Each structure stands twice: as C-alpha cells, then as structure tokens.
Image (tube, grey):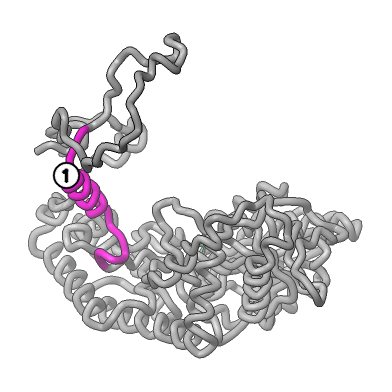
Amino acid sequence: MARLIFEKSQKGRRGCLLPATGVPEIDADSIIDSSLVNEEDLYLPEASELTISRHFINLSQKNHFIEKGFYPLGSCTMKYNPKINERIANFHNFTRLHPYLPINCTQGSLEIMHDLQNYLADITGMDSITLQPAAGSHGELTGMLIVKAYFKNKGEKRTKVIVPDSAHGTNPASARMCGFDIIEVKSNQKGQVDIHTLKEMVNEDIAAIMLTNPNTLGFFEEDILEISDILHNAGALLYYDGANLNAVMGLVRPGDMGFDIVHINTHKTFSTPHGGGGPGAGPVGVKKFLESYLPVPTISFDGEKYCLNYNHLNTIGKVRSFYGNFGILLRAYAYILSMGKQGLKQAAMDAVLNANYLKEKLKTAYHLPYDYQCMHEFVLSGDRQKEQGVNTMAIAKKLMDYDVHPPTVYFPLIVSEALMIEPTETEPKEVLDEFIETMLGIAKEIEENPEQVLSSPQKTPVKKIDEVLAARKPDLCYKPDNT
Ligand SMILES: *Cc1c(COP(=O)(O)O)cnc(C)c1O
C-alpha cells in the first residue's frame, strides 16, 4: 500500500480546477532573467483533493492524541483541551497582531495579558507574575536566575540548591545551569520530604529548595509549612514547580504554603494541546520582595492605559522575545474564564477522585509501593510482573494495542519499574473502567502467557522495535515494507 503522498501521485491529477481568469497568459521566460528560471520539473506530488484529505487524515491517526483515546501520562496532565480555547486563540484580532505594533494599537491584548497575570497571581497566591517564560523548565531557569540575582544583590554567597529524590529531572538541571550545586534530600516512607534529613542539610550555603507539591509520587507534602520555616529561618528561598497545580488549583495556593517563586505550566493545568513538543508557557510568580528581579517586560496598568513595564530595578533581563508565547497564554486565559473559580476547584477535585479510583482498583494486580490516598496521580511498580518476565516497558507497549497511551514509565526514579498514572478530570467513569479492565487483563495475561505480552505492540504502525538501536541509529529512511 502506498504510504507517501509521492507514491500516491498521478501525473496530471489536480486538487481543484479553476475557471479561466480572463488575464492573458505570458511566458515566464519573457519577464524573468533566463538564468533564474528552473529548467527541471519540480518534484511535487499531484493528487486530487480527496486523496490528499484521506492521506493526511490517515497520517494524523497513526499517532495518539487525547481526542483519539485515553492518555494517562503521569505528571503531564494530558487533559482534554476544549476547542473553544482554540477558536478564541485563532481570532484574527489576535493572529494578525504584529509584536512591533505600538502599544496604543494593542491595548486589548495587553489588557488580556494583564488580567491573566492577575488571575495567575490569585490562583498561586503570589504578588507579581511574568508571562515571558516559554515552558515549565524555562520558568525554572528564570526562577533560579532570580534566586541567584537575589543573593548576589544581598552579598550572600549561597552555592547549593536542595532537590528531593522524587523531583523531575529539569529541577536539578535548571539549578545547575545557574551554577548551583545540587544536593538531594531523600523521601521518607510516606513518599514525602524527610524533615529530619532536611533539617540537617540546611545551612547558610543553601540558596533554595525546589519542590513539587503535590510531588511526583502524587502526594501532598504535609509538612510544607514546617519545610518553609526551616528554609526561611536559614535565609533560603522556596521554589515551587507548578507542574502538578492541576491537583490543587482553587483549593490551596503555593503562596500560602510559603513558596517565594512559582512556575505554572499553563499547557498542563490550563489546557493547551501539548506533548508533541508543541509550544507551552511557563509564567513565573514571585512574592513582593522579589518583584524587582522579574524579567522584563511585565504588563502594567497606569490608570489609563496598559503598558509594557521595563521598570524592574534588579531585573534578570529578558528571557524571551516579545510577549512570551502569546497564543498559549490566550488559551490559558480562555480556559480560566470559561471554568471560573468554582469550575477550576471542581476540576482539581475530580482529577483527585479519578486518580484515587484507578489506584484502588489497580493495586489489586500491581504493586503500589506507597499505599496512601493520592492527589491527581499515583505510581505503581511493575516489580511483580517483572518477576514473571515482563517489565514495565513491555506493559507500556502492550497498552498501545488497546489504543491507550502508556503512562509515564521509569519515573520517578525512586520507584523501580515505575508506572506513573494520571487520568485527569476530563475522563468519564466508563473510560476509567475500561482502562482498569485492560490493565487487569494485561496482568492476567502476564501470568498466563508472558510471551504474548512481550511481542506487543502488534496493532501500531510501527511494531516492536529495538529501543537502543532505534535511539543510537535512528532509521529515518522510508522503506515500503518496513514494519
Ligand atoms: C512537565 C514537568 C516539568 C517541565 O515542564 P515543561 O513545561 O515540560 O518544560 C517540570 N517538573 C515536572 C514535575 C513536570 O511534570
């Protein structure tokens, strides 16, 4: 079967036929210098509109996406993104704006960004927001640059940042990029930061701690206020990785937990299609005493008009061109407005309910190393199945045969054979029940016929591949019979 549009090409086929224009035809050679005229035929596919339409529709379905099936990719919050957000972000009034337009021509857009800053400040409990960073990890980098500038300005030499052993890899990476040394704090038996170890670590070398709350095991750090006191009493700052804000928005605010700097992954919490490497946004919020360090510009209102505010005394400078990822910020704005205060709170509670429902049902067949009530996600271990000859990677592959995107695997690092599952609030109970049935079915199949599971996936466009070989020597050439 032909797979490339080039193979489907038929000489002379047209997508559409236009009536004659009535404008006389002239030869290109007569008006363009002959040295500039291409002598060879262009190698372009020729196909009817229907062929093209089918081709791309079929291609689009070879990949997985939220509208196609369940997508419980832990920590990534692959919720359904309402189409109304797309429609609004695609209004011509927005898409035709040029970033160099003078601000008297962009008052409406600036107002939206100003409002969004206020909403995000309200939701996180922070005093001031920059919308500039382009992703969560970029927010981390921005936050760590602020930490660095803050201590430099105070004349304090603090060289270390504490990161829990359950942290996302971007946390230590961001701190390291700013020149900090990383020290790791262990999690206790409840999967939370071990307060006693933390107390011993904290001294005047520590610049900050980076925490995700709820953390990547899906647990709310119950000792957060004490953690905050320990760090603050030693003169250090608290950084909040907001990737899991979906679990707590409208219910509890990082600002009230004692955090000084926060990033928000708007693409996760506030609904933007992401996961294919697509754009995101990582606004950063700070408490008042750090406001002067924010990257420029922020948006402010002088009582009459909205302006780009470059007036931050200790600013770390610019972290991105123009306004940040404006289109993504618009989607977040539309989402927040359409949900309202009550809606956001309900979404968080539903996300937690869905996760706990799955956890209780799945722990009958899979090992649950931290068996406590979770927030929006939980982490199973495939240890039991591995003993039977099937590791977590194989379970993940098997799920693809059921049109389910595999959960996050082998993360967090402190759980062996980890399967990190985040259903999100947008899935109905029937989908959760189907997933439970699938997962329990796989566990049963592993007991009865592990070989069968190991040969999966069978139904995907690309079947079982040699992971290492594929990573080291990616084969990007098209071969018609390639499976
Ligand atoms: C997704 C994620 C990040 C990184 O965010 P990006 O927007 O992908 O850069 C950081 N920490 C945690 C816990 C995450 O899940």
Q: As shown in the figure, which amino acid type bears the numbered disc 1?
A: Thr
Q: Nearer the viewer, residue 163 or 55?
A: 55
Give the structural element (helix, strand or loop) at label 1.
Answer: helix
On screen, residue 170 above or below 402? above
The C terminus sits in image quarter: top left
Q: Nearer the viewer, residue 260 or 382?
A: 260
Residue 46 x, y percent position in the rendering? 20, 33
Mark 1, other Cα within 10 Å: few <14 / some 14–19 / many ≥20: some
On screen, residue 399 above or below 431? above
Residue drawn at x 35%, y 69% as measured from the top left: 421
- Count every numbered label the image shows and give the total: 1
Residue placed furthest toward the right: 155
Q: Nearer the viewer, residue 403 or 223?
A: 403
Is residue 312 a member of the stretch shown in magenta? no
Q: Which residue is mark 1?
A: 51
The answer to whether one can see residue 238 in this image is no
Residue 258 x, y percent position in the rendering? 70, 78
Q: Is residue 384 left or right of residue 423?
A: left
The answer to whether one can see residue 397 in this image is yes
The N terminus sits in image quarter: top left
Q: Is mark 1 within 8 Å of ligand 1?
A: no
Is residue 57 a member of the stretch shown in magenta? yes
Question: Magenta region: which residues?
Answer: 46-69
Location of residue 35 by image quarter? top left
Residue drawn at x 43%, y 59% as measured from the top left: 274
On screen, residue 1 above or below 77? above
Residue drawn at x 41%, y 74% as measured from the top left: 377
Residue drawn at x 71%, y 49% as measured from the top left: 178
Q: Is residue 176 left or right of residue 385?
A: right
Q: Nearer the viewer, residue 245 or 386?
A: 245
